[in-house]
Amino acid sequence: MRVRRGLARGLIRATRWKLVGTVPTKGILVGAPHTSRWDFIAMLAIAWGNSARPQVLIKHTYFKGPLSWLLRALGGIPLDKGNPGATIRALLKEAEGHDSFLLVIAPEATRSKTEYWKPGFYKIAGQTGLPIGLGFIDGTTRTLGMGPIFDPSGDVVADMDMVRDFYKDKRGVHPEEWAEPRLREEGPAQPA
């Protein structure tokens, strides 16, 4: 683990980014804004830089071919977005008996601008009792790390208001692709 931590911190320094915050020992880690193919590496750097070793849900099509073994070695878990049930059930079972279960989810589920985030991070946290940690990548300040960690209250609007407040100034690597954190369960954004 020391090697991973040193590698991650060295990579962050070499690319002139800065790492802030602390990764929890157990929880669901939100990876946002998800605007670049490099976000996976950035989330690993955040975790490894904090001596954590998370699992990461990745679209199953990336596991075809020669990189499959590497993605798995880095904690990647293939997810068929058309039928995620079996994968999610297996993860829920694993989370029950594991003292250091960390799962990274990119709720935007795409690097393109989207109207709604996928609710998986919120549902899994609610079903497992795990806290949600807000990981972030902010290209404008060249900062990545962990923000607040919270237990979902069950009031999705209030919880997402807190999430929106945290991410309001985070823009990712490609700011034009940033999507406001909003779950379909909340309904459309209210006009200001």
Image (tube, helix red, strand yellow):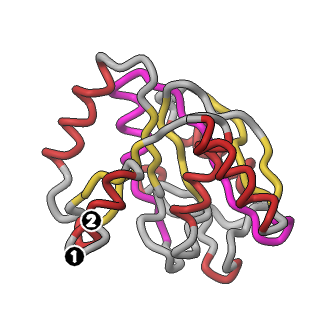
Q: Residue at x 35, y 20 (%)?
A: 98
- Residue 107 located left or right of residue 147: left
Please, what is the three-letter code of the amino acid marked with disc 2?
Answer: Ser
Name the quadrant containing residue 191.
Answer: bottom right
- Quadrant (top left, top right, bottom left, bottom right) of the N terminus: top right
Q: Position of residue 27 (x, y in %)?
A: 49, 30
Horizontally, is 101 left or right of 7 in the view?
left
Q: Is residue 35 visible?
A: yes
Q: Secondary structure at mark 1?
A: loop
Q: Quadrant of residue 22?
A: top right
Instruction: Give above or below for 26 relative to 74.
Output: above
To which residue does mark 1 refer? 65
Q: Looking at the image, do the residues carrying marks 2 and 1 touch, with CB atoms under 8 Å apart? A: yes
Give amino acid for label 1: Gly
State the image coordinates of residue 144 (x, y, percent, origin top left): 73, 55
Image quadrant containing the C terminus: bottom right
Q: Disc 2 designates what residue?
A: 68
What residue sits 64% from the left and 31% below the top?
A: 149
- Looking at the image, residue 71 lies above or below residue 173: above
x and y percent of residue 136 in the render?
67, 54
Q: CA distance from mark 2 to mark 1?
A: 6 Å
Residue 112 locus on image (x, y percent): 50, 80
Report if residue 127 lies within the magenta region. Answer: yes
Segment tinted magenta in the rendering:
115-142
Q: Can residue 153 be seen here?
A: no
